Amino acid sequence: MNEITMTLQADHLILEALKEDISSEDVSTNAVIRTAVQGEADLICKQDGIIAGLEVFRRVFELLDADTEAELYCKDGDEVKRGQLLGHIRGDIRVLLSGERVALNYLQRMSGIATYTRSVAKLLEGTGTKLLDTRKTTPNMRIFEKYAVRVGGGYNHRYNLSDGVLLKDNHISAAGGVARAVKMAREYAPFVRKIEVETENLDMVREAVEAGADIIMLDNMSPEEMGEAIRIIDGRAETECSGNVTKENVERLTKLGVDYISSGALTHSAPILDLSVKNLHVVE
């Protein structure tokens, strides 16, 4: 996540998170630290995984005080081990104490997503199938969560509703059928937009192919149905498998030869990676 992205898209979200945690003052910190005192603390890994969100972690403290410094010994995407020292943060102890929880919330959440994504992506290695995330993200956390998916080795599906055409079951019902929905989307959307259609059975697959869909999503079908759907499509559209895909069941889809497998679990079900800020002490 580069500096421009952070400034334009992330800073206001980080500030809102800080305001949520500090509505008027940090009473605990102000009670024991009455004036500015320089300090340092360690960022420690407590669980094996993939680290993601280090610049967001740093940015939390910088937004509280631009003079805060973070010295980091790893980079996003690195494998980290339990007990590993990941870096130091230095600055006004009041800032370190007040920003610690928000900074860790971001880093733990993002690292957990990257770790889970890496574990699923490894199961797809050598298949030619790309692992995609979905829009099933935590409100106001999408930019962080989708970034973490990329760090973990996955790919981003559309970022939001303005980013691409995906005609789901309710769009199709509202339009009056697959063919009509694709026709209307083709007329409305810019020519550079691909049109994806969600299908739930083989009849819908046939209709989507005939309507000229660019991508056909095979949603909540059995592996046998998906195999038949791929034969029907026969390379005339890109293919995507979806529907309750997790690390535990993704291998049943790896031999199908689809272009993409999408999984909401990457963002909505990944556990956090356990990290900690410890050993806070005064420095001269």
Image: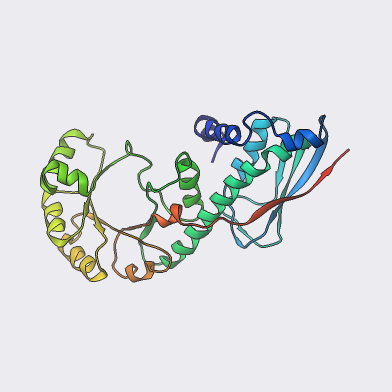
> In front here: 198 or 29?
29
Q: Is residue 92 visible?
A: no
Q: Is residue 208 visible?
A: yes
Q: In this image, 108 relative to 240: left or right?
A: right
> In front here: 67 or 64?
64
> In front here: 237 or 228?
228
Q: Is residue 252 above or below residue 160?
A: below
Q: Position of residue 265 (x, y in %)?
A: 42, 57
Q: Position of residue 186 (x, y in %)?
A: 17, 39
How many dots with numbers?
0
Q: Is residue 131 above or below residue 194?
A: below
| Residue in view at x 26 percent, y 69 percent | 223
Q: In this image, 258 relative to 207: left or right?
A: right
> In front here: 70 or 145?
145
Q: In this image, 53 relative to 210: left or right?
A: right
Q: Position of residue 209 (x, y in %)?
A: 14, 54
Quadrant into which the C terminus falls? top right
Q: Quadrant of residue 247?
A: bottom left
| Residue in view at x 59 percent, y 56 percent | 273
> In the displayed image of the protein, which residue is found farthest to the right?
284
Q: Is residue 174 above or below residue 131?
A: above
Q: Is residue 71 above or below residue 10?
A: below
Quadrant into which the N terminus falls? top right
| Residue in view at x 18 percent, y 39 percent | 185
Q: Position of residue 46 (x, y in %)?
A: 67, 59
Display coloring: rainbow
Q: Quadrant of residue 81?
A: bottom right
